[in-house]
Amino acid sequence: MIAHKDLVPLGRVGDSPQETFVLNLGPQHPAAHGVLRVLLTMDGEWIQRAEPIIGYIHRMHEKMGENRTWAKFLPNTSRIDYLSAMHYTHAFVGAVERAAKIEVPLRAEYARVITSELNRISSHMVWWGALLLDLGGFTPILYAFDDREKILDLLEALCGARLTYCYYRFGGLYNDVDDAFLKGTRDFVAHLRPRLKMYRDLVTDNIILRKRLTGIGPISADLCRRYGATGPVIRGAGVAYDVRRAEPYSVYPKLDFKIPTYSEADSMARYLVRMDEMEESLHIIEQALDQIPTGPFLGKVPRVLKLPVGDTCYAVEAARGRFMVRIVSDGKEIPYRVKLRTPSFSNLSLYEEASKGMILPDALAMMGSLDLVIPDIDR
Amino acid sequence: MSFLQIEPVRILLYLVGICAFVGANAAYLVLAERKGAGRIQRRPGPNEAGFGGILQPVADGIKLLAKQVMVPPGTDALLFRAAPLMVMAPPLMCLAMIPFSDSIVARHLNVGLLFVFSFGSINVMALMLGGWASRNKFAIISSARVVSQNVAYEIPMLLVVITLLMVTGTMDLNEIIHQQGGGIWHWNLFKVWVNPLMPVTFVIFFICMLAETNRAPFDMAEAESELVAGAFTEYGGMGFGVFFMAEYANIVVGCSLATVLFLGGWQSPIGVLSGGLWGAGWFLLKLYGLIFTVIWIRWTFPRTQFYSLLNLSWKILIPISLFTLLLTGAMMKLPVVYHQFF
Amino acid sequence: MSLLTALRDTYSGFKSLLTGLRITAREASKPSITVQYPHETLKMPERFRGHVKLVLDPVTGKSRCTSCNLCVRACPSDCITVEGIKREGEKKKSVSEYTLDFTTCSLCGSCVEACPSDAIEYSKDYNVVSLHREDFSRMDLVKKLEAEAKVWAEKNPEAAAAAAAASAAAMAAAAAAPAKPAVAPAPASAATPTPTSTPAAAANPVAPVRSPEPKTT
């Protein structure tokens, strides 16, 4: 027979009179979406302390940036957050363009906006499906993947890759956006609007989902500020912070879009922010499709790229929040430093403080609402 | 006929029959579940083994049988091995009471309903012991959940059944079915003149049945995104397979009971053609209709949170079922009182 | 009042559940959207980026690669090795060995962009499967090209003959010593292709293309 003491190896934590035990969630756990490990100190089903342990797929992306030329680092940027590869490439390309003062043709900028927003939708769809999977609903992820498949097909036909696009180049694009892509995107926008309504009816309005997310895992704006959480997490806390508005880049200033915010600061608020963002992205794509000019898709770029000595930052609004690249050049062909500020890392940092005193299913629901991508944390 | 009425032959026949029925149902309901999930998710489901995947359960069974049943070190080996048997036995016992038609019933007992409910409750203990014996934290959490969930849902379920018993006045399952003969409007589900809330009681019964069999959206026992596989985390091979089969066997029992109590059992909805094999046909039709609904529900909704699950039972289902109980009592007694005084 | 609210909440919650059931039932009645992969395959789009391969020049029946090594220098992961020889009767160097280490390739396409003579392109072959690591860590693109050239020569005998004649003429013009036999493109077919090195043009051993319909988007 098992004695009760065998199950409670830790004894007491702090001054708590209750007995606790340690639950090792991950690195291989169905809810961890990859190799995130969370060390939970539990009191029954109540979490006393949740300590995320990261670094299982650390790949030294920043160090890799320091030993290859600017152009050779480009494929890496798609692999930091594989779900929103476009944004990450955009940030790096944008940083180099800003440092080297490379002019980007307008057509390329609009194409970047269209592909970025498509990528944002596809990323949010993966999040939506994965969150529902965490909550035990199996069907939504397949509906989401059906629609996401259409985005991936469009982008595949455009740039040849489905996930790690590596589509942007210094000064423009890898290849031109063709009419088939523009038409396909327009069709997709028309297709997705009713589908989003279906998502709303099937899941968002569902009483079970509402009960599981409303009031669960409050993350206040103050907590977000302290840990640097951005993206839908801070917008779900009622702060209208969006890099596309706060530090305008590309042609976003020319486009009209709302920043969805909810002041409830719970998981449902973050959920609704992302659902609204998908609609906003469709709105942005429509405008960009109307405005995209003809012309070259690649600007003039020197054959051997040497950046002037200096320090440049470029931030974009990735699907998970503010992604910033800081590059330091010492005038050589190879960067002196490539710093990647990834949103998932900051969004995870607040998990320990925010999950205190929650019960296990709620804590997992909250983790799902943070939309973590583990390679983005570890990078 | 005389040969079939010899007691040992009869026992053997029904033992084999029920085991075969449970086995075939468990195997093919898994396939039906996967096919149904595929249909809802717009994919074909398993379709490689045999014509359209018809041999998939066989392939799964062979795979599970070929695997070693591991008993992890530190577990309570006896309980660990006994739990799958204990989880499988109650549904087999319960099915012996279910009348498939007016003549096909393994054991005719005048307290059949009581028998079914008392054996149905054992199922919880098996899950709890399995989880406890596994010496796994996820399994322990799951066991605790199973117990409180089942205790919470047994109450509204029994309240609903008591309401029904007041109407029928018997615990004999076949007798309950006989009372519902003569067309769809005689089914207990539609006896609104006895109690206008009869359809509501059916919904409560159905919800409780889902919770008792640990089915989605109440599958707290094996909430795979939280507890890996819940109470079955440490089970592999056929040990896991038996738990899995028992889940489906329990669904069959639960749905049969719902059919018997509310949908007229083997009675035909049109009032004629309910004898003999016709009756068995009607019964199976209703049974699989309910099972299909169970599958449909699973692939539509997310899982409830554990505390809202308990809230649903204590704050919504129990008050409503108590109210229906009172209402039924009042409606039955009021005419008597009326006649006595006026 | 609160009892009324509770009843209304219960009712609306129940209604939302029925809405969900209605939606899944509606979806269930629609046809399946998946592709039964081994039985049917999809056609890759024009710009699909598979592993790189050498381009077969339809005029000469040979590779256009001049082994200038620009692709090697452009590659971020150092996965390309190119060797070239100067063959008899040819002005430029031609490729004799082009090895791709597909295990480290990130399919970024820098090599294709860097190539000045359009000698490499993306393969449309996505069924890259093998039991041997060497088939990926030392992917011999010249061998693949030769296998492709053989198929091409069988399909277009006139073009192949013309190419062979042109190459012979070039050799004669260069007045090379007859003792040294030229390396003809097609005879290299003696090299048996490895199971994975089947060119995309040939029928795929794993997945015979039954209905190569274009993907509906």
Image (tube, coloured by chain):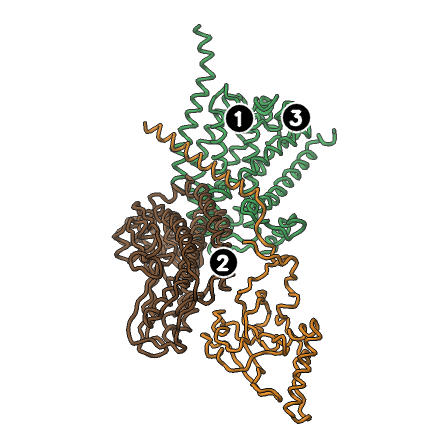
**Label 1 element class:** helix
Query: Mark 3 highlights which residue?
Result: B274
Is residue C121 positioned above or below B317 on the image?
A: below
Colour applied to chain B: green
Q: Chain of mark 2?
A: A
Q: Give the label on residue B189, or none.
A: 1
Say if labels 3 and 2 share a chain.
no
Decide which of tag 3 and tag 1 comes sooner along the chain: 1
Q: Nearer the viewer, mark 1 or mark 2?
A: 2
In the depicted view, which residue is nearer to us: A222 or C74?
Answer: C74
Quadrant including the C terminus of chain A: bottom left
The amino acid beneath tag 3 is Ser
In the depicted view, which residue is nearer to us: A278 or B14?
Answer: A278
Report how far apart the C-alphas of labels 1 and 2 lie in the structure: 56 Å
**Label 3 element class:** loop
Colour applied to chain C: orange
Residue B272 image point, x, y percent: 66, 23
